[in-house]
Structures are given as C-alpha cells and as structure tokens.
Amino acid sequence: MKCLKGVACLAALAAIALLAAPVAAEPRHGLSLFGELKYPPGFKHFDYVNPDAPKGGTVKFASFGTFDTLNAFQLKGNAADGLGYLFDTLMSSAEDEPSSEYGLVAESADIAPDKTSVVYTLRPEARFNDGSKITPEDVIWTFDTLKAKGHPRYRLYYADVLKAEKVGDRAVKFAFRNGDNRELASILGELPVLPKAYWAGRDFEKTTLDPPLGSGPYKIQDFEQGRSITYERVKDYWAKDLPVNRGRFNFDTIRFDYYRDPSIAIEAFKAGQYDIRRENIAKNWATAYDSPALDAGLFKKEDIPNKLPQGMQGFGFNTRPNHPFQDPRVREALTDLFDFEWSNKNLFYGAYTRSRSYFSNSEFAATGMPSAEELKLLEPWKGQIPDKAFGPAYEPPKTDGSGNVRNNMRTALKLLEAAGWSLKDGKLVNAKTGEPFTFEFLLDQAQSDFERVILPFGQNLKRIGIDMGVRLVDPSQYENRMKKFDYDMTVVAFGESLSPGNEQRDYWGSQSADEEGGSNILGIKSKAVDALVDQIVSAPDRDALVTRVHALDRVLTWGNYVVPNWHITYFRVASWDKFARPKIAPPYALALDTWWFDPQRAQAIEAEKPQVQQK
C-alpha cells in the first residue's frame, strides 16, 4: 500500500508492503516475514527513539505545487501534504527491522493456520480525536469504502480480500480468496481506520476542504488552500504512550509551506523560512547551499546512510498506442543515447551509481546468469519476453564519459532501422508513412532541474534525427496529465520495499495499465509479467520470493521500459541546527518523527541569524 502524501511517509518509505508472519499458536502482538520479531510482547519502545524526548516547538517543511483537497483517499484533486498524520492504522511499522509491524489500533493479530484469514483484535482504549470509540464497524466500513470508492490502488491491493466481518465485541476478521497471498494479513495491518459516523451524510468520493476527523497524533490547525497547511499535536492523543509511539511525534506543530519554484524554495530554506529539507539534486547539494548561515553553522548538511532498496528511477516510456514507444527496439535505441557517464562527471559531481535493476541496492536485483529456478519461471514465456532475459543480467549502455557517443549512435540507428525507421535529410522518419520521429518530454516545475540532464540527451537524439521537445507544466496540470497517462516520456520512480509483493500488480499489472490514476504509468500489458507478479505474491518463503523477483527484474530491465537513471544509498538532509535526534538512526527510514525541538539551540539561532544574514 502506498503512503499518504507528506513527510510522515518518509518514516514508512520502506514499508510499501509487508509479509505476514508464520503461523502462530495464538494471537501475536506483531507480524514479521522472518518469523521471530525483534521486539517481544511488552516491549517499551523502539530502539531508535528517545523515549523521553521533550514535546514542543514547531517544524516547517516545504511542499511543491498546490493542494485543493483534504481527502487523501481519492483519485480526484491534489491532496495536501501531511494528511497521514491524521489517521492511525491497525499496525505500525518498525524502521529497524525488515518487514515487521506491531499493534497500534489493533492489540493483536491472529492468522489462520491455512492463511486464508486474519483476525485483528482492537484495543479497548482506541479512540478517534473527538473521544468516540474506534469499533469493528469503523474498520469494516473503512475497508469496504476504500475498496469500492477509494483510489484505484485500493481495489488492486485488496483484490484478494473477500470480506471483512465482525467477530466478537472488538475483533474483525478478514477472509482471503485463498492462502497463497502471504502478505495480505500485513497489508491489512496498514489499513487506516476512518470514522464511519463522521462520513455518514458526506460524499466520500468528492474532494473536500473540511478538516476530517482522525485518530492520529495530529489534527489540522489551519490552512490556506494551495499555500500552506499546519497540523497541531493532539495533546490527549489516545495512543501517545503505546510502545510503537513512545519517543515519536514530538513537535507541537508541523507546517507545510507550498512553493512552485525549486530554486526559490532553496533560497527560502537558506533564509530560515523552513527548517528541514531533503535534497535530491547532486548539483544543489554541491553548490546551492553555500551561504553565511552555513558557514556560521546555523544550518548543516548531512549524508545519513540507509539500507533502503533504491528501486528504479528513469526516463519512462509511455508504451500505449498513439505513442512512439511500443516497439522495444525503439526504446532500446533511445536508451543507448543517454550518456550517464558524461552526466555523472559534468553534472552530478560523480555522486551517483547507475541503476541497472528495478530493485537496486537489495538482494532482489538480478545478477549474473539466471539460476535453474529462475529459468523454470521464464521458460513458459519464451517468445513473449525478451530473449536476453535468458542470458546475463541487464547492464545499461556505457560510454567513455567524453561526450562522444558515436558507437552508441551506430547501435541505435541499426535498432531503429530494424523497427521501421530511416534517416532522410537529417530526419528520422517512419519508412512506411514518412512521419518524422518526434515526441515530448513532460516535466512539472518541481522537476525543472532535470532539464540540464534532459537537454544533452535531446541533443544526442537530434544527431540521429529525432526531435524531442521538453514541456514544463505546473504541478497540478502535470498530476492531472499523469493520472490520464497523457505523456510520451517523463521522469518516473518506482520505490521498492524490503519485501516486494502486491504493489507489483499496481506497478506492472495489465489491469493497472487501464485504470486511470493507476501506478502502471508505463502501460505495460504482458501476460508474462502478470504471471510473474502472481508468483511473487504467492511466494511460500523468502528464497522463493528472491528467485521470483529476480525473474521479474530480468523481464522488466530487458524490456527497456525506462532509460535507467541513478541512485545513492544515503539521505541528503539540510536542517537548521535547532533540533535534536536519537543517537541510533534506523537503517530503513529517515524517521523525522523521532526528532525533537531544542529551544535553547533555537533561541541561539534566532539571535545570531540577523547578524549572519547581513553579511
């Protein structure tokens, strides 16, 4: 399941999907793919928090674009950042333990011996923020409503859940289609619980600017549509002392200010208009933060290591009809003409590693020749998947970094000629129709820094007669176009968890390719891919899961659905030095919700800031 928008998602980036634990003799306080949980029953708090962290202060973040709804569960509208703070889920993830979760709204989970159902027992003290009790009816209504009326992703994620029913005063049973989908129990643990009574008489399918009733650690204090939204900590939050929450959610207020221009946003950070910034652009990290405030130590830049799978970022091809990228030879040819080595040296300060897998930086990335077990999965699809999937693992094209791509151009032209294109008078044209090869690269304003990478790519394409235009649109228009798959090429990113599973259907499944707002924005429609994803979802153990993901990775990479980009294995974080954080950092998240406000540091910063900024 995907997170709601906002910084709260940073703490859950690695938990897109979780697998259920082996069968237990009795209800458990947590679930884990690996059997034994790190934290035993009765544990006091996670190791990576300060359980005595002081509460107080304000933290400000930057958001980009705009928002026009406070309903984050719908495809319609642009939801405000941070709405995930409003809603508690049945279980809560541990960010120092792969694929595990512990009771939040639910005090325990009981998986049936045949894995065809799970029963979640709710805590008797669980409450919404108006004091009303969280009941099984609320859980059932939430599940039914999200599946029937929520964002399309919920229908995909809950497709194998047949029904939810009340069993006892505080328990809900979810029945599954069969026992093959081992992660369903924990996917349901990520279910946000919404108040049935609040939504009675309200249209769940519409956008709204009415602050919704939640059960989480924060509620909306105020907002200015499209410009800012502020959350205030719920002082009597029912779950503040639970083991999964101790030492977390320490700020009294959290504010998101919206910017339309990334450069202005950086200048605003350096001026102290917001407090913490994740940086994704190597050039910015190397040069854009230079200022008297940095020199004086008022804010700092840190590389914080992590062990997160890096997934795939790339220039994504729209493979649907009426776009020029249905032929895989065309996609392979264009991939040959992206000069990563030159870009890394001249644009990225050598900061990046080229991505060669959809599961980079993890054991799920295919390597070497396929194993016998992988070949058994691939053989039935011979002729329907790339022949290269049966050979060595994918490696993207390389150059010498000089900017000379003549060899790659020759290879690309041969592929394009085989695909029915020919070079005439300096223009690449369709050999049958004479139509020139032109397409548009779509970017939103928050991605404007990509232009310096895309334009050299476009120059290489121009040298073989392809005309690539770049269209920069505002974030709202970009989001609407992407929901409708109205693009030729754009920057795409597919995040991966420590346990790939049901989310793969949303990324690559044929059904998702036709579902407006679905995550299969590349338009992949392949029976082979569908079957391999089903194999992943039904993997009986970790070894089988790794093998099946390797097979899928080979098919996706050799399918050339994206021009692979790059990745790093650390967070780049700039922050004003008025916060403290625990000594132990979790390996699978930045965990900003464990930081806290230091009033003495903040006072010193504010006193020194005017003098420094005058320099």
Image: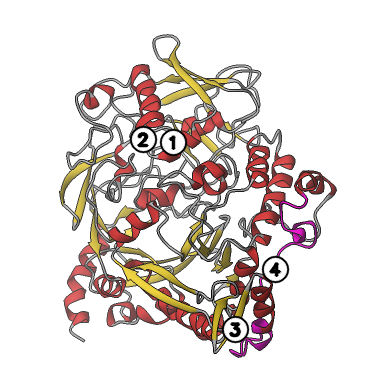
Residue 16 picture location, percent across and down: 50, 44
| Label 4–label 3 contact, CB within 8 A | no
Distance from the alpha carbon under mark 3 to that under mark 1? 46 Å
Is residue 407 rendered magenta in the image? Answer: yes
Identity of the residue drawn at 68% across and 54% down? 555
Q: Which residue is mark 3?
A: 423
- Which mark is drawn over residue 321? none
| Label 2–label 1 contact, CB within 8 A | yes
Camera-side residue of 24 and 508: 508
Residue flagged by tag 3: what amino acid is it? Leu
Distance from the alpha carbon under mark 2 to that under mark 1? 6 Å
Quadrant assignment, res 415: bottom right
Quick one: label 3 or label 1, which is nearer the N terminus? 1
Distance from the alpha carbon under mark 4 to that under mark 2? 39 Å
Residue 124 picture location, percent across and down: 36, 18
Q: Is residue 538 above or below residue 299?
A: above
Crowding near the residue tagged with mark 2, few <14, some 14–19, many ≥20 C-alpha atoms within 10 Å:
many
Quick one: label 4 or label 1, which is nearer the N terminus? 1
- Which mark is drawn over residue 150? 2
Q: Is residue 234 above or below residue 567?
A: above
Residue 458 picture location, percent across and down: 49, 80
Q: Judging from the image, what secondary structure is the residue with disc 3 in?
A: strand
Residue flagged by tag 1: what amino acid is it? Tyr
Quadrant assignment, res 39: top right
Taken as a whole, is the magenta stretch helix, strand or loop?
A: loop
Instruction: Report the number of numbered marks.
Output: 4
Crowding near the residue tagged with mark 1, few <14, some 14–19, many ≥20 C-alpha atoms within 10 Å:
many
Which span of residues is magenta-colored? 382-409
Q: Which residue is mark 1?
A: 154
| Label 4–label 2 contact, CB within 8 A | no
Q: Which residue is mark 4?
A: 395
